[in-house]
Amino acid sequence: MAFRAFTQTHVYEKQSAPKEKDKSSIQCLESYDQNVYLGTKDATVQHFILPNCTNGDPSSPVQSRIREGRVRKLGSSNQVTKLRVVPLFNHLLVLWDRSVSALNMFSLELVSSLKKIQHVSLFEVCGSSLQSQAACVQMVTVSSRRKLIRVHVVGVDRWDVLREVPLMQEPVALAVDGTSVCVATSDRYLLCDVQTGSSEELFRHNHSRQRVVVSSVGRGEFLLNGPGSLGMFVMKTGICQRPPLQWPQEVLAVAVCYPYILTLQPQVLSVYSMLDQQHKQTVSLSGARGLLSASDGVLVFTERDIFSLRLVPLEEQIQALVRLERVEEALLLLDGVQHHLPLDSYKELQKAITCLAGFVHFYQEGFSEARDLFITGELDPREIIRLYPDMQPCLSEDFQSQLDQVNKARDLRVLCQEDRNTFHHYLAFLGDFLTAVRGSEQSLQCSKEVDCALLRLYVELGDTENLQQLVAEPNECSLEHCAPVLEQHNRCFALGSLYQSHGNQIDAIKTWVKMAEGSHSDPSCSDVYAHIVWTLSQLQDRNVVWKFADWTLQRNQEIGVQIFTKRAPDDRFETQEVLRLLEKHLPALLLYLEFLIYDLNSEEERHHSRLALAYVAQTMREEEEADLRKTRGKLQQLLWESTFYDVSTVYEKVKSAALHIETAVLLGRTGEHSEALQLLVHQEGDLQAAEAFCCRAAQGRGSQFMQTLLLTLLQIYLSSEELTSAAVDLLNNNPRLFAAEKVIQLLPESWSVQLVSQFLVGSLRETFHQGRMVKLQKALGHAELNRHKVLWMQASKTKLRLDKGQKCQVCQRDLAEPQFASNLHGDLMHTSCTGFSSL
C-alpha cells in the first residue's frame, strides 16, 4: 500500500464537439470557496459551483458533481490569460486581450466603474491583503510596453496606481507577498520591494519562458525554478531558510498546499514535502496545463477537464505512515503540522508515533534513542516488560497491551536462547529505561510491575549494588512474587532488606540471623552481623530489639552493645532496663557504663560506682589475660578523675581484691595519704607508683602540699635501711621540691655530705634563685613606682589659665572658686566633679 497525501477526483469535463476543441479549451482557472471560474481560449469566462464534498463516489456521473453558473463572452478572439477573485468587493479580475477588467463574481457582469487597465502582460493580487479586513486591496501589474511594474490600490468602484518600480528587463512571471514582489525575467530572478522601489538580483537561470516558475509559499517566502532542476525557497529578505527541492527538469507549474509542494509535468503531477524535501506521491495526469491552490487542496486542469486533488486529513496521513512503518516521516509530518491540528489530537498522535518510533530503534539496538522516545511518548512501561520472556510473571493478569502491532522484529524469546550476548544488551536497556521512569508520572499506574521487573532484572544480571539499593529504599515490590526469586538465587541479604522495607522487621532480621549462623549463604554481604547490629540500633520497634538483643550480645559483646549505644538521642532505651540485660554480659556492661559516663556525662553515683566495681570484676577475670593492664588503667583513671562514686563501697571491693594501687588511690581520696604511701611502698613494692601517687594527689593543690607528701614518702624510705638508696634517689631527683632545713633534720647522722651533695647543691641553687627572683620583683615594682612619680611631677608643673566665664568640663557650670582640678588632657573641672571625669 503506497502513501497518499492527496486523493484525486474528476470534477468537471467540458462537453464539446471535436472541431471546437482548440477554440474552447481551458486556459486558466480561479476558485474561491465552492466557486470555480474557467477562462477559455475563445475569450469566455464560465462560473461553476462545486458541491460541498468533491470526493464523492467516483462511479457517479461527472456532471452531477458540479453545477454550472453564468457564462460571460468577452469577445470574439484572444484567450483569457489569468483570473483572480477579490471577495472583499465580489470582483473577478480578468486578464484578456492585454488588459485587466473587473466582473461581478456571481453575475459576471462588467463592473462599469472600473475602467480597463490597458497594456498589461501579467498581474497578481496581493494575497495578504485579501485575508485582511482592509477597505482596499493591492494589485501588481506588469506593463507590456514598458519595463516596469505598477502597484494599484483596488477599491469597490475604482483602482488607482500607487507607485511604479522600473526594471532592467521585461518580466515573464511574478508572485506577490505583501510589499515584496518576486519577478522572473528571461534570464534571472529579481526581488523587489514595491514600497521602497528597491530591487536586488537573486540568481540567474537558463529556463525557457514556459519553464520559469515563481510562486508565493506564504509568510514572506517564494518558490522558484532554479538552475540544475532545483526548487529554490527564497525569503523576502533574500536568504534561503529551507533546503532546495530536487525536482524534474520539465516543471510546468507549481502549487503550494502546506506542507506539500505540487509540481506539474507533461504527464504526471509530483508531490514533495516541504518538511524533508522528499518525493511523497505521483499522480498520472496526461495533458495537464496548470495548477491552482484551493482551500482544501489543489485543482488541476487540462484543456477539457478539471481534477480536484484534495488533501488527505493530516491525521489519516500520519496514521498511514505509521502503518507503513515510516515512523520518522510520521513524526516529522506531525511536528510540521502541529498548529493545524487540535491540541488534544496532536498530543495523542505525538505520543503514539513517538512510541512506535522508539520500537523501531529498540529492535535496531538503538537503545539510547529508544529510551528517549519511550519517555517522550509516555509509553506504559508494561509494554516493554511484556516483551521479555522472564518478566511475564511481573505483569498483573488484568493488563492488556494497547499496541496493535505485528512484531516483525526479532523475538526476544528466541534471542534469549540463541544470542545471549545481544540479549544481555536488551536486558541492560530494560534496566536503564525502568530506572529512568521509576517514580515518575509515567509509571504511577504500574509501579509494582516496574519494581518487580527491576528486581528480577538485577538478580539475573548479578547487579548487587542496584539490587540492594532497590530493596533497601521504599519500593512497590510484591513479596509474594519477589521473595521466592531472591531465595532461589541465594540473595538472602537482599531478601532481608526487602522484608525490612515492607515493615516486616522480624522476618528481615531472622533472615540475616540465619546468614550469620551459616544456615544461608550470600556472597554479596561479607559482614551480615554488623548489619544486624546497625539495623537494631536504628529500629524504633523496641520489641524487635529486645527479641534479638541477647543473641546479638552472645555473638559479640563489644559490637552487640552498639544496639544501645549507637541509638539516636531521642530514641534511647531506659538505662535500668539495659543494665539488667547486660548483667550477664560483663564486657558489654563495661562498654555501656563507659558510654553513660564519658559520652552522656552521667553524674549518677550508681553509674560511677557500678563501673568501678565492674572494672574490679573484669580485672579479677583477666588475671591470666594480656589486657589486664588496660582494664586496670581504666579503673585507676576512673578512681582518680571521678568524684561521683561511693568511695567506701568501692574501697571494700578493691581492698578484698588486693589491688594495692587502686586501694592507695581510694585512701588518698579520704585524706589518708601516709597509709596510702605505706601500702604502695611496703605491700605493692612499687616505688615509682608511690612517687607518681604524690604527683597525682598534689595536682591542683599547690607546691606546699607536694612538699608534705614527698616528706612523708622520704620518712617512709628512711624508716627502712633497705630503702636508703631510694631515699637518696628521691632527694637527688627532686632537690627543688624539698626544703633543705627540714630534710637535714630527718637525715641519719651516719650519712655523709658526699651522699647528699647533689641534693644540697640543687636545693641551695633553688633557694638562691628564689631569693634573687624576689629581689628582682621588688626592683621592678620600685621602677614602676618611680615612673608614676615622674608622671605626677610632670603633670603638677603644668601651667593652667583660668579665664572668666570658663566652665567645668564635667557639669558645664562656671568655675567661680579658686580651687579647681585638671585631668591629664588639660580639661578644667570642679574638685567635686573629679570623681565623674573620664581620664
Image (spheres, rainbow, N blue to C red):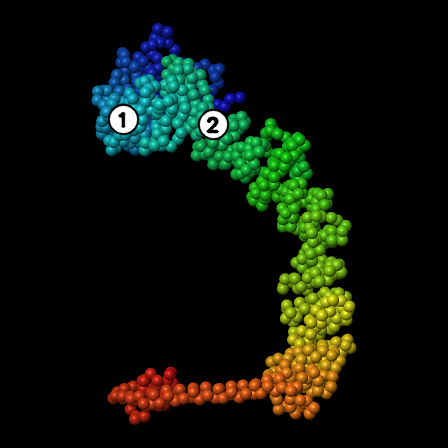
Residue at 43% across, 34% down:
339
23 vs 424, nearest the viewer: 424
Residue at 73% across, 86% down:
721
Outermost bottom residue: 818
Query: What percent of the width, then of the height, locates residue 765?
Result: 56, 86
Q: Is residue 728 above or below residue 62?
A: below
Q: Which label lies toward us, 1 or 2?
A: 1
Query: What percent of the width, then of the height, locates residue 608?
Result: 69, 73
Q: Secondary structure at mark 2?
A: loop
Give the crowd class for mark 2: few <14, some 14-19, many >=20 residues within 10 Å: few
Q: Residue 781 vs residue 374: left or right? A: left
Residue type at numbered disc 1? Val
Q: Is residue 1 above or below residue 455?
A: above
Q: Residue 766 vs residue 748: left or right? A: left
Query: What percent of the width, then of the height, locates residue 635?
Result: 70, 73
Q: Which residue is mark 2?
A: 313
The answer to whether residue 728 shows anywhere in this view is yes
Q: Are marks 1 and 2 in contact (CB under 8 Å)?
A: no
Q: Residue 724 vs residue 69: left or right? A: right
Q: Which residue is mark 1?
A: 140
Q: Secondary structure at mark 1?
A: strand
Q: CA distance from mark 1 to mark 2?
A: 34 Å
Q: Earlier in the sequence, mark 1 or mark 2?
A: 1
Residue at 68% across, 38% down:
393
Residue type at numbered disc 2? Pro
The answer to whether residue 480 shows anywhere in this view is no
Q: Is residue 657 above or below residue 86?
A: below
Which image quarter holds the C terminus?
bottom left
Q: Which mark is residue 319?
A: none
Q: Residue 361 vs residue 547: left or right? A: left
Residue at 65% across, 43% down:
458
